[in-house]
Image (tube, rainbow, N blue to C red):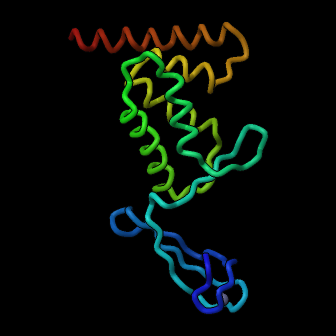
Amino acid sequence: MKCPFCGYTEDRVSDSRQVDDGESIRRRRECLRCKQRFTTYERVEDVKLVVIKKDGSRQQFDRDKLIQGILKSCIKRPVTLEQIEKIVYKIENQNSNLLRKEIPTTEIGEQVMSQLKNIDEVAYIRFASVYKDFDDLQSFINELHYIMESEEDSENTENI
Ligand SMILES: [Zn+2]
């Protein structure tokens, strides 16, 4: 963030909090060069998330890439692009609201899965098989059993 006093681009954030019912984030900053303090407001949707990949490297959260990834799992399934965009939007919002800046990709994967599960099970399983990186066939089968059991449970509840 550029210092409004001297134009220097590096600063220290001393406080972050949500304002406007969580729609904006207010940050108190101190310029590392001239030491002047200033306040910035960022829309939650503009807050940049960084993902931590499995090898520990960091990357800017890429909304389109995530949408593409979910789309692949939804080939020939009755899932609309709008539903997928909503999943991604929710994930961005949810993490920004927690004022988190860095999230492991595995956690994003989990968040996608928990939402996809309620939309389409086939898409969910496809996505899970990529994201969970099953080490062997058995753990994949275990996951399938788990899904089918919870499916039965929800059917039972519907019957009651
Ligand atoms: Zn300055």
Q: Quadrant of the C terminus?
A: top left
**Residue 21 lies in quadrant:** bottom left
Quadrant of residue 153 within the rendered picture:
top left
Q: Position of residue 1 (x, y in %)?
A: 61, 75
Q: Is residue 121 above or below residue 145?
A: below
Q: Residue at x 50, y 50 (%)?
A: 95
Quarter of the image where ligand 1 sits: bottom right
Residue pictured at 42% horizontal, 44% vertical? 90
For the image shown, how many numbered marks are present on the structure? 0
Q: Nearer the viewer, residue 146 or 97?
A: 97
Q: x and y percent of residue 97 in the render?
A: 46, 56
Query: Residue 57, image x and y in percent?
Result: 76, 46
For the point 62% across and 80% down, the residue is 2
155 left or right, relative to 146 = left
Give how far across and how far down residue 86 sits, in percent: 39, 40
The answer to whether residue 37 is above or below residue 62 is below
Direction from residue 128 to residue 10 in the image, left or right? right
Q: At 57% across and 33% down in the image, what residue appears? A: 109
Residue lying at the far right in this picture: please name it. Answer: 55
Rendered view: 89 above or below 124:
below
Rendered position, 66 above or below 50:
above
